Amino acid sequence: MKDDLVLDMRRLLALMDQAKGRFVQLDDGRFLALTHAFRKSMGDLRAYTKAHGNGLRIHPLAAPALDELTGEVGELIADKAWQEQKRRLHDAQQLQPELPSTLQAELRDYQKDGFEWLARLAHWGVGACLADDMGLGKTLQALALLLTRAPDGPTLVVAPTSVCTNWISEVARFAPMLHVITFGSGDRQKILDNLKPFDLMVCSYGLLQQMRAAEMLAGVHWNMIILDEAQAIKNKNTRRSQAAMALQGDFKLITTGTPIENHLGELWNLFRFINPGLMGSEKHFHDNFAGPIERSNDVVVRRQLKRLVQPFILRRTKAQVLEELPPRTEIVLHVELSEEERRLYESLRQNAVQYLAGIEGPGSGKHLRILAELMKLRRACCNPSLVMRDTTIPSSKLAVFGDVLEELLDNKHKALVFSQFVDHLQLIRNQLERKGIRYQYLDGKTPAKERKRRIDAFQAGDGDLFLISLKAGGVGLNLTAADYVIHMDPWWNPATEDQASDRAHRIGQQRPVTIYRLVCKQTIEEKILALHQHKRDLADSLLEGTDMAGKMSADDLLQLISEPT
C-alpha cells in the first residue's frame, strides 16, 4: 500500500462534495479519514477560491483569511502577485505611523488607533471601510490620514449635500493646510486640470451622478478618494454607484456608520468600490455568502465572510470607546388606536388583501403594489387624515405625542422629532403652532444654508423641538442641545433610525438621552419593529470587532398585510 499519496486541492474538494461524512472515498476504492479541523480548512479554501485551469485562483487580498491554512501546508506554490501581497501586508503590519504635526486637534486614543489602522491599509495598498458609530469622529480620523498623504497629490471627498458643508468647516478647523475646492463652481475642467498636492475637492453625490460631472471626475487619478456616508452607493444599479466605481485613486476610503443597512448585497457593492474582486461576482457572492447567511443563518459561512472582510473594516461603538458619554435609554410607547381608527385600519387592510389577490404573473409589478398598500397602512397608523383627507377621526398617536411633549416641556427638556412622512410633520407643526410651542424644522427640500442656520439656532436655544424628516436628518447634524428623541413612525431599517437618534447622542452631549418610539398596537408598525432585531443581529454578527423592504420577497411582504394583527 502506498503511504505517499498526493492529492491536489481541486480533486480533494471534488471528492469531499461526494462524501456524506468525514470519510472520503478515493479513486482506487480506499477511504481517507479527514479531521474536523481539516474539513473546516477545506471549507474556508472553497469559500475564498475559484477553479482556474488545473489550480485554484485566490484573490490576493484574501491572504489574511487564508493565513492559517497556508501556514499548515507543507509546500505552497503561489504566483508572484500572491507573494508580493504577503510581503506588503507584512510591511504594513510593521509600520508605526505618526500623526501629522499640521493636524489642529487632540485625538482620543481610539481615534489615534483609527488613524494608524488607516495608514497601514494605505501603505498596504488596499481600500478601507471606517464604520465607527455615528458621532465618533470618522471625519477627523480621515483628515489625519489625508494630511499625511496630501503632499502626494489631490484628494476627492464625495458626501451628501448636507455633509459637504461639514467637511469644509472641519477642514478649516482641523486641517487649514489643505486647500478646499467645491466642485460645481467656476470652470470645472480647468480646475481639475490644475489640481495640485494639498488640494481637497468636495463634491456632492447629487453632482457625482450627473453624467458629464462623473466623466470629468473619473478622468482624474486621485491620490485619495473618500466616500462619506458611503451607504449612498449601496445599490449597484444607481447612477451614483456606477459613477463611484469609475473613479480612479491610489487609496479609497469609505466612511459609514451603517455598512449593512438592509441586506448583504450592499456590503458587496461597498467592497466592489474599495477592493474590487475580493468578494467575487455578485452571483458568486450571493451563492456562497449572502444566500446561506440570509436564508438559513449559516454560522460557518457567516464566520467565513467575517474573516474575509475583517481586515478592511474598522468598527467601534460608542459603548466601547466613550466611557464619558452619558447613558442612552430606548423606550417603545405603545399607542392604542381608537375604535374608529381600528375600523379604518382593518378596512384598509382587507381592501389591500382583496386588491392584491387579483394581481399575479411577471410584469404585474406586484412587489411595488404591495409596498404601496403597506404605505397606506403605515400612514393610517400615524394619522387617519393622511389616508382620508377630510376625515374628522382624531389621531391617537398625535394625542400620545401631545402628552409626552407636555411632560418634556414642563421639565425643561428639548427633543428631536423624526417622521419619514413630510405631511405627517406638517400635521405636527400645525399642533405646535396652535399651542404656541417654538420649534425648528427641516426636510429634504430645506436649502443647505438655511439648514445650517436652523441647526445653529436650535443649538443656541431657539426652539424646544426640532422637527426633521427621517431621510434628511440621518446625517450631517450635530444637535446635542436635545436630550430626547421621538420617532413618530418606525422605518423598515433600524440603522436609519439609529443614525437619526445619534444626532443627539454623540460627542458633546452632557445629559442622558432618551429615545421614544411611538408604535400603534396590533398594526403593521409592531411587525416592522419585530423585524428590527433580525437586521441588527445580521450586522452585529459580521461587524463585531470590526431598506429591509427592498430585500423581502413579495410573499413575505404580502404576509405582513394578510395576517390580522
Image (cartoon, rainbow, N blue to C red):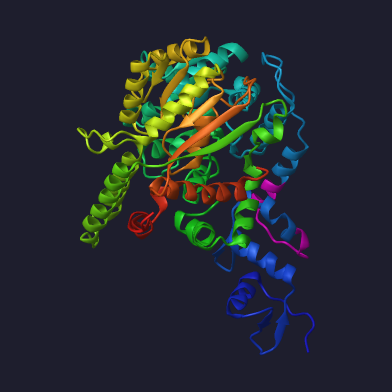
Residue 40, compared with residue 472, is above or below; it is below
Quadrant where the N terminus sits is: bottom right
The residue shown at (70%, 42%) is 88
Image side of residue 94 versus residue 282, left or right: right
Above or below, 123 against 276 in this view is above
Left or right, 247 with reference to 46: left
Q: Is residue 508 visible?
A: yes
The answer to if 77 sits in the magenta stretch is yes
Residue displayed at 58% across by 69% down: 54
- Asked if residue 344 lies in the magenta stretch, the reply is no
In the rendered image, residue 433, in percent from the top left (x then y), is placed at 34, 16
Between 191 and 490, the one lying in front of the other is: 490
Region in magenta: 71-86
Where does the C terminus fall, quadrant-wise?
Answer: bottom left
Q: Between residue 27 and residue 532, name the one nearer to us.
A: 532
**Is residue 245 at least partly visible in the picture?**
no
Residue 285 image point, x, y percent: 50, 56
For the residue pair 39 and 469, the one nearer the viewer reads as 469
Q: Where is residue 143? Give x, y as percent.
A: 61, 22
- Please give left or right for residue 176 compared with residue 281 in the image: right
Quadrant of res 28: bottom right
Residue under the point 73% across and 71% down: 36
Q: Position of residue 53 (x, y in %)?
A: 55, 66
Q: Is residue 204 above or below residue 338?
A: above
Question: Quadrant of the rendered structure where residue 141 is?
Answer: top right
